Image: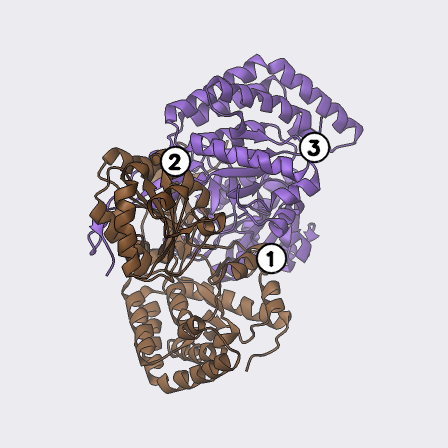
Chain colours: A brown, B purple
Amino acid sequence: MNQLVNIEQVQLQCKKTQSAAKLLGVSSEQKKNEILKSMSDLIEKNRLAILEANKIDLERAEQSGLSRAMIDRLTINETTIRQMQQALNQVANLADPLTSSYPEVVQPSGIKVTKKRIPLGVILMIYESRPNVTVEAAALALKSGNGIILRGGKEAFESNQAIAQCWREALIDNEMSADTVNVLNSTDRQLLDQLLKLDQHIEVVIPRGGEGLIRHVVANSHIPVIKHYKGVCHLYVDEMADLNMAIDILINGKTQRPGVCNALEGLVVHQVIAKQFLQQAFQALHLKDVQMFGCAETIEILPSIDKAREEEFLAEFLDLKISCKVVKNIDQAIDFIDQYGSGHTEVIVTDSQQNADKFVNRVDASVVMVNASSRFSDGGELGLGAEIGISTSKIHAYGPMGLESLTSEKFVVRGNGEVRS
Amino acid sequence: MNQLVNIEQVQLQCKKTQSAAKLLGVSSEQKKNEILKSMSDLIEKNRLAILEANKIDLERAEQSGLSRAMIDRLTINETTIRQMQQALNQVANLADPLTSSYPEVVQPSGIKVTKKRIPLGVILMIYESRPNVTVEAAALALKSGNGIILRGGKEAFESNQAIAQCWREALIDNEMSADTVNVLNSTDRQLLDQLLKLDQHIEVVIPRGGEGLIRHVVANSHIPVIKHYKGVCHLYVDEMADLNMAIDILINGKTQRPGVCNALEGLVVHQVIAKQFLQQAFQALHLKDVQMFGCAETIEILPSIDKAREEEFLAEFLDLKISCKVVKNIDQAIDFIDQYGSGHTEVIVTDSQQNADKFVNRVDASVVMVNASSRFSDGGELGLGAEIGISTSKIHAYGPMGLESLTSEKFVVRGNGEVRS
């Protein structure tokens, strides 16, 4: 049951997770993989209990009139169970990020300086209705040597508690502290705000969810926050573009999975090819039921579509909708993206090396792509192995975050009695 | 004159710095070095104006009864002027951090993924009485392609404005926007708090000063903060230590410059060598007028010294004082440092490779040293070329921060029309 817990209790729990994280941080890769393997087995073994708990959450969700999309995210079934197991095995197969080695450089003073990769310590993950995060985020934290405090949404409370029980067993079975993965048993908002002040125990907060939740966390946290507010990704079709390629990339980016943050929300078209391309685009988008919103120049070419207001240019639709803007040249395209993009992913389609380089150098986004779909902006597709989240601020990490983003580096100095003069 | 400025004006200034930073971020290394060179010349040329402005600050400081240490930090003289020029030339000689190259990896989808190093954007530097920061922090920001907003203390107001005038000329002489280096002309506290909310224009805040100022910034900022609260650095003298080496490292760490954050504040001694070492240490420290505070075991050996309370074990003395603790073994030393250290710099003196490795692996500090003085914990000495600050949180940077800490990385993807299936 969702408990009323006071801050002293939670602070004590965080301290315990901090101590547990220290032990985990110096554990072998084998030990960490064994925990992940046990967890996979325990999820299988406790399948029915997890499904039962999820059923309670789903019944409550139906009663409280949660949206279909939210209920989808909340639902656990046999497929989801297998996906959780796959995720655990996948993370176990990733390289341990703490094993990277650094050169040792002798300084003029004689001291030898190198670095060592280390875990962050304790991660606080704040998320909404997806119970799979309780498995996957914790798996990534564990593999990188970090303790984790998981604060899921109240909608997924029972599911998260059932998964938490598996984590406890997996840790204890491997002689590690059950506090290493700490699934909070309260979803109280005020408690969350107090948690966000505990910078002596927690190293970083990663919120995942709606922009409102994330802004609330940023405004109230004394702990560093790694976040992305939204993904407003654009495709710029250059005058030198292969237009068929541009259509493929447009349709894939907009329609393959419209509800995710790397889906396209805006189309920017060079005026020279605007007429031909926009007519082709209109037909292709129309077939996929995508609604277009255009600037004045777009509407001259496509009089049947809606006018794009400032609101549409700024929108993260997460839906079958797209805004369109005709620009005079690549510079204007870059300025437009600068103004309306969210720093997530921006794509150019062009055959001009010069324009591609200009776009890559000047566009300020965590992922800049030439002639490829924005949908590749994902930890797995970019070669990170897995993804704990995305950062659209440039501090610590920028873009999809893999295991290495859950680590830091310390300096290691070896000397022979050197002192400073 | 210190102006009353409203937040709209400051927001406009920040926006201008943001635009200016975009141009700087794509400027050549040569251009950036030319600005630094011009600045060095202009500081020479406007020497008298700077000294005159500093005189006004110093007179006000004397009247308001500022401490001798504060007045020292505030004072500009011919030597300080030359040091500012040297710092500018030194930064110009450092490698441009944006030129680092990354391998390109082909993913199973066919896309080619690489990274590109980029500036952060706009840095907000908040500091107290040292006007040299107005030169040095801006130089590092410029070299790494960042705009900077400098908010110095009211004590140094006139000095900072005189230096700001040099920056404006140096930028304009090189056809760059004068807004690139933005020295605020108000030191109002409320305005600062509003500035800390402008995360749409500012990428990172670096506060330098007393713990009170830094905690205030952390509690009020919506922008990521990179900071260190204090440096409580320890020397652990292991049972396997060369005791003469340990004495040298102790005296250097404690007395060479007691007022800095990498000075030693605590001595931890293995019980087996405690009697011999503490007596040697007492004599050596006594010669340098260092006051010792000891745990019960220390006082058994050195009955004349003061008892260390919790307060002394936690203290960043920044003075000729040191706390002493006798421990049973290296594990207890590591636990003690874990409890009382500040994550800045921790030193072991030992001849045992095994104990050295244990200390390096298990001590949680940004710089861990074996047989070398804590005073080497400095950007210059560690090979970073220069230092903009120190981070004792593990997010983004840990330890002394050089030019690279003022940058981030974006993903660059090149494809041939790949879409996601």
Q: Mark 1 belongs to which subunit?
A: A
Amino acid type at mark 2: Gln
In this view, the residue in front, B332 or A106, is: A106
Instruction: Identify the element where label 2 is drawn.
Output: helix
**Relative to A310, B110 lies left or right:** left
Disc on res. A99: none
- Disc 1 or 2, which lies upstream in sequence? 1
**Relative to A172, B186 lies left or right:** right
Q: Mark 3 belongs to which subunit?
A: B
In this view, the residue in front, A210 or A148, is: A210
Location of the C terminus of chain B (image quadrant): bottom left
Task: Tell whether label 3 touches label 2 (CB within 8 Å).
Answer: no
Disc on res. A220: 1
Amino acid type at mark 1: Asn
Instruction: Identify the element where label 1 is drawn.
Output: helix
Q: Position of residue B238 (x, y in %)?
A: 48, 53
Disc on res. A332: 2
Name the residue beneath numbered marker 3: B154
Mark nearest the camera among 2 and 3 is 2
Query: Distance from label 1 to label 2 (Cα)?
Result: 37 Å
Mark nearest the camera among 3 and 1 is 1
Instruction: Identify the element where label 3 is drawn.
Output: helix
Amino acid type at mark 3: Lys
Mark nearest the camera among 1 and 2 is 2
* Residue A15 found in image quarter: bottom right
Q: Mark 2 belongs to which subunit?
A: A
**Within 10 angstroms of label 3, few (less than 14), some, or many (20 or more) residues?**
some
